[in-house]
Amino acid sequence: MTYLINQLILLTFFVFCIMSMTSARTESPSNNSLVHAVDTSSSTSSFSSTSQKFNPTSKKKVLILDVDNTLYNEEHLQSNGGLGIEEQIIRKTHAFGRKYYSLTKEQCDELYRNFGSTIEGLRDMLISQKKKDIEIEQMLQQYYSYVYDGIDMSCLLPSPQTSQTHTGYSHEEDTMQKRQMLIDLLQNIPHPVYLASNSPKGHVLKVINSLGLSNVKFEGIVTPDSNRDSQGA
């Protein structure tokens, strides 16, 4: 669980930095950052909120946490003998591209590199083909259902093995203790906390529940299907 300890240290550091900020000036966040600090003038939203308008002149600070391979460690999940979350998504994305668009694995990966995600590449491809909006929307719904509905979250759950080693060390107990440390830290951040992901909102909720974070108050979730959710509300 060294990774989780490192993440807790990094998260604590970022929270300290945010609390120390006195300037109202904001910077454009990097896509690769663990945590983004931004200023917003929007009112506090419920957990189901999916989009916010940011005002660079406001002094209200919020924390944006990336979900994918940040709240969990993909390499650690795979080292336990199974497929990690990201590996499942990649494999099913390749299968989707092959089944519906006759795309090779390499072509799917090229879309990912060029557009930041394979689904955005597919969207751009359909737009360039002059497809109607309803056809693009149907593709998005089909993709999210095909790729994410069957993701196995068991790799995020604590090991069912309760036996201790000869040293008295219990892996399950250690995992639960460190997750409780993460929960305590998140609940004591003095700023609204948002989650962001390239995955759909339903998948993010499953990850949160599997990690035992369902009782943590998050102000909102920012995902690719955020606008569609809010429009359908």
Image (spheres, rainbow, N blue to C red):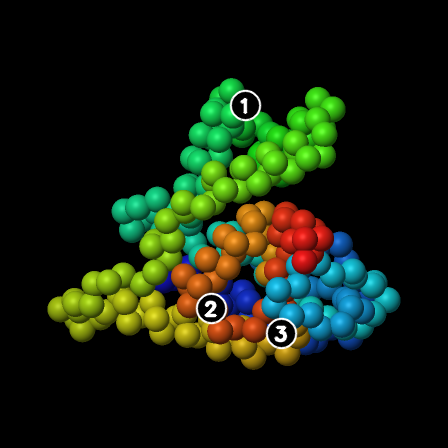
How far apart in space, not on screen, are marks 1 and 3 (Cα)?
Answer: 47 Å
Apparent side of residue 154 relative to residue 205 in the rendered image (left or right): left
> Which residue bears the numbered disc 3?
16
Q: Is residue 91 above or below residue 161?
A: above
Q: Quadrant of residue 27?
A: bottom right
Q: Position of residue 150 (x, y in %)?
A: 40, 45
Disc number lying in front (2 or 1)? 1
> Which residue bears the numbered disc 2?
213
Q: Is residue 15 above or below residue 101?
A: below
- Three-letter residue code for mark 1: Tyr
Q: Position of residue 170 (x, y in %)?
A: 23, 69
User: Which labelled disc corresponds to residue 101?
Assistant: 1
Q: Out of 147 and 19, give the one closest to the viewer.
A: 147
- Three-letter residue code for mark 2: Leu
The residue sitting at 74% across, 61% down in the picture is: 52
Closer to the chain start, of discs 2 and 1, is: 1
- Three-letter residue code for mark 3: Phe
